[in-house]
Image (spheres, helix red, strand yellow):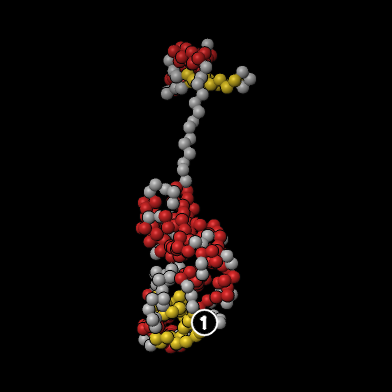
Amino acid sequence: MSSSTSKKGLGRGLSSLMGDVKDVSIQTDNTSKETKISIANLKPSPSQPRRLFDKNSINELAESIKSKGLVQPILVRPSPSESGIYEIIAGERRWRAAQIAQLHEIPAVVRQLDDIEALEIAIIENVQRSDLSPIEEAAGYKRLIDNHGHTQEALAEIVGKSRSHIANIIRLLGLPQSIQDMISEGKISPGHARAIMSSAFPEQLAEKIVNENLSVRDTENLVKPKKNRIKKVKLKDPDTVDLENSLTARLGLKVTVEHKGPKKGGFIKVDYKSLDQLDMITKKLKN
């Protein structure tokens, strides 16, 4: 499949490969066949976007396979470089569990797929199963864009996501590796990561999120620029200042005059510190 072909009708092309159903790994068509393949003749595909596999989950699957067998076949393609070897396009977790269960061979659907089709199907299968971490998903999308000429719009159609989802998740790859690892390990969410993305100190903020168990809303408020509140100081009229100084000298106490305007009036405030001073003010007012 060429880049130009890949950009046109991607959804339709993949639908024919995948059978228009959710589980891509068990569909067969005229270009594929189901057979049993030796465990030793299978290897993970370099197109596999998934890098993290939960050991406990695989061990649980292995126990299930021991008791019930592997009911669902994996999806493979003949290796382009090794005769008799098959690359796993979808089902690497099942293959790993089958090894633990000590199976010698497992059912597989063999398809003739090129590199682009293999990567597309691997991404779709994992996204549909929610098996990929956000970083793995982003890396898969970026490979299709950088290496195979896909557009974000075409990817959105392929995986059934919005174009904004594709754009936002790819942005995560611009974060420091330590933060990407936190996302992959589930310590912080993509929402947290987007909130600190434009910060000058994203790694310190990420640590703060983990240590203080901050929500995405808390994080957004934390990085939101604080507006400098500048209080406007209204200068007093020189005549008002002279009056204040004159009354202060006359009474021997601090006098403040607040004049609000010709038609608004105002007030005079006299500060005193003792009852004697208050008595003195009262006598002067009576006189």
Residue at 48 percent across and 35 percent down: it is 229
Q: Is residue 60 above or below residue 159?
A: below
Callout 1 crowding tier (Cα within 10 Å): few <14, some 14–19, many ≥20: some
* Residue in front for this viewpoint, 268 or 123: 123
Q: Is residue 13 above or below residue 172?
A: below
Helix, strand or loop under label 1: strand
Residue at 50 percent across and 28 percent down: it is 232
In this orientation, does residue 225 appear? yes
Percent from the top left, x then y, of residue 28?
A: 54, 82
* Residue in front for this viewpoint, 119 or 98: 119
* Residue in front for this viewpoint, 253 or 211: 211
Pointer 1 residue: 32
Q: Is residue 119 above or below residue 101?
A: above
Q: Is residue 273 above or below residue 125?
A: above
In this orientation, does residue 212 appear? no
Residue at 49 percent across and 31 percent down: it is 231
Residue at 53 percent across and 59 percent down: it is 152
Percent from the top left, x then y, of residue 74?
A: 46, 80
The amino acid type found where label 1 is placed reads Ser
Count how many numbered circles sit on residues in the image: 1
Percent from the top left, x then y, of residue 222?
A: 44, 48
Residue 160 lies in quadrant: bottom right
Percent from the top left, x then y, of residue 33?
A: 51, 84
* Residue in front for this viewpoint, 59 or 84: 84
